Image: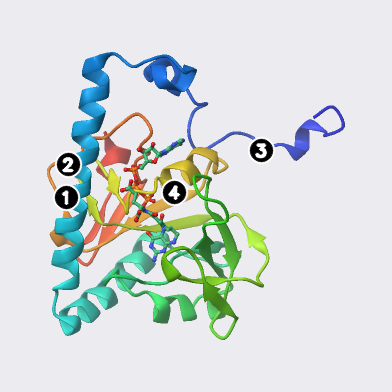
Amino acid sequence: MADRPDDDLPAGYASPPCFMHELDPAWLGLPAAPEDAQQRRDVARWRKAERQRLIAARMALDPSLRRHWCDRIAAHLDASLGPLDGLTVSGWWPIRAEPDLRTWADTLPDRGASYALPVVAEKGRPLVFRRWRRGDRLEPGVWNIPTPVDGPEVVPDIVLAPIVGFDRACWRLGYGGGYFDRTLAVLPAGRTVVGVGFSLFAIPTIYPQPHDIPMGMIVTEEGRRSEYLNR
Ligand SMILES: Nc1nc2c(c(=O)[nH]1)N(C=O)[C@@H](CNc1ccc(C(=O)N[C@@H](CCC(=O)O)C(=O)O)cc1)CN2
Ligand SMILES: Nc1ncnc2c1ncn2[C@@H]1O[C@H](COP(=O)(O)OP(=O)(O)OP(=O)(O)O)[C@@H](O)[C@H]1O
């Protein structure tokens, strides 16, 4: 650290410093109160079942309706994000009927923006992002998801996160790896974080847990919700 000048360090982080040790005794290696441990198990079990239900419903959607919704999501993203010149936007390679924004992503270079895809470089660690454009090499990564191998590692200005389920306060339910929460916890401050999904998968609550980090906004085919920002 001593040989690193302060101005090389990020000005701050997207989330406050980790106070998990104050919220979660397990963080200190202490046994959790039995009711806390029970509550965590109940939430984890509920999330697992809810994920299965929501993913099955998404995969059962009519493909042409899904394509139509994806076009609308792309239009709402453009309206919500504004000019992208000079920015790096991260997305995903769609699996399991996630919104397919690949055609939208193809338009980014012409707008002076670059695109990046997430990479699980290490299990249980934050995602890294590699710059990617159509034609660049992809290789199967975790869950066989096509993943860039050659592009430089980048820190996106705008992180788009695919959603399995979400609630009105912009909490996101993903696939249960905790990858986006870990990533957002170390993302430099001032980045835009957008959960993207279909409005059908709004649920009353995801039962947010201490490790969860809400999205700055959610974009669906119906438009933009950002109640978290307005609270
Ligand atoms: N298209 C796409 N790519 C993406 C993501 C995504 O959500 N969508 N990710 C977004 O994060 C990352 C991959 N996410 C993953 C999330 C969970 C597991 C996983 O192994 N899940 C466990 C179940 C965990 C549990 O329920 O406790 C498993 O299947 O055994 C793997 C990858 C990076 N790439
Ligand atoms: N910042 C973190 N540090 C350590 N562990 C974390 C962190 N964030 C999440 N986790 C772990 O990841 C597990 C899964 O988290 P969660 O159910 O929120 O996943 P998810 O958001 O649905 O998944 P994903 O982001 O991969 O799509 C949690 O039980 C927690 O143990």
How packed mark 2 is, by other alpha carbons closer than 10 Å (few <14, some 14-19, many 20 or more), is few
Quadrant of the snapshot with the C terminus: top left
Which amino acid does the dot numbered 1 rest on? Glu
**Mark toward the start of the polypeptide (3 vs 1):** 3
The residue that disc 4 covers is 179
Percent across and percent down for residue 94 are 36, 72
Q: Residue furthest right?
A: 3
Amino acid residing under circle 3: Pro
Q: Identify the residue position indicated by label 3 in the image.
A: 10
The kind of residue on which mark 4 rests is: Tyr
Q: Residue at x 25, y 20 (%)?
A: 36
Q: Nearer the viewer, mark 2 or mark 3?
A: 2
Earlier in the chain: of badge 3 and badge 4, it is 3
- Using the numbered discs, state the Cα–Cα distance from disc 3 to disc 1 in whole angstroms: 37 Å
Q: Earlier in the sequence, mark 2 or mark 3?
A: 3
Q: Quadrant of ligand 2?
A: top left
Graded by Cα atoms within 10 Å as few (under 14), some (14 to 19) or many (20 or more), the crowding at tag 4 reads some
Quadrant where the N terminus lies? top right
